[in-house]
Amino acid sequence: MSSVSSTGRNPGIDLLRGISILLVLTHHLALRIPLARTGLAAVLPHRLLSALSWSGGNAVTMFFTISGFLIAGHVIERHGSLGRIDAPAFYRRRLRRIAPLLAVLLAVLAALHLLHVPNYTILRPTQSLAGALISALTMWLNVYEGRTGYLPGGWDVLWSLSIEEAFYLGFPLACLLLGRHDRLAAVLFAALALSLPYALHTLSGAPDIWQEKATWPGMCAIATGITAALIAARLPPPGP
């Protein structure tokens, strides 16, 4: 997974991203047009249709893992170890990458809500436009949904970004606290990754929305990617 092409891209990561994107798209499509009721049912096995329809959550978990792998890998490539991370530069890069597009998306979603466009209008009495905007900007939209219910589809996609942003905020601080002890970092991140079964167990009795959008499992997936990056950095480069 550590090999890259002459263009600087990682074919393995690109493949995983492509599969994840396909699963997320088919999941959202199946929510509106059940695939079992389409012509695909005549040519594809039921189990495959079911997997294509309802594996969106697994695909998001894969995105989290890829994110952890790439972010940690880039830090190691730039600085030699996680403990040498340039935190201010890291935050600036993340801000430049996320803030402009997020601002545009939130402006569009707010306008669609104010125009009462179906499927974009926030109607639950426990929710409001201000609440959705504030939670999206303060990295807890997933918690906001867990407490108040699902937001309309256009807003709902932002829950995973809240987990990503929380990771971006805490990752440099964790790296600096661990210093240049990459082995200790690998052990701690691996421990977080391996806590996923326990995290899922503790959420097993919670409402479905909490099981889907909880922060802990998402962080476990990101930690899996970080651990993989730390291991990959210690492996010899692949042969020709």
Image (cartoon, grey):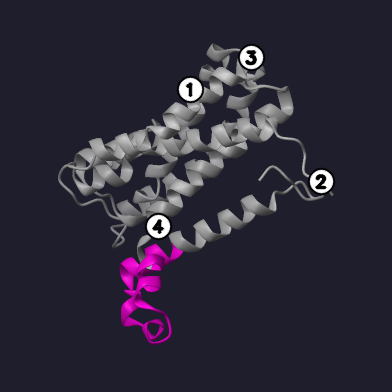
Mark 1 packing: few (<14 Cα in 10 Å), some, or many (20+)? Answer: some
Amino acid marked by disc 3: Arg
Taking the spot 38% from the left edge, 30% from the top edge, the residue there is 138
Taking the spot 40% from the left edge, 72% from the top edge, the residue there is 48
Amino acid marked by disc 4: Gly
Q: Where in the figure is residue 4, as x and y percent of width and height?
A: 75, 47
Residue 91 seen:
yes
Q: Quadrant of residue 214?
A: top left
- Residue linked to disc 2: 239
Helix, strand or loop under label 2: loop
- Residue linked to disc 3: 180
The magenta stretch spans which residues?
A: 25-52
| Alpha-carbon span between mark 2 and mark 1 | 31 Å
Which dot marks residue 188? 1
Residue 45 colored magenta?
yes
Helix, strand or loop under label 4: helix
Taking the spot 37% from the left edge, 37% from the top edge, the residue there is 196
Q: Are marks 4 and 1 in contact (CB under 8 Å)?
A: no
| Alpha-carbon span between mark 4 and mark 2 | 35 Å
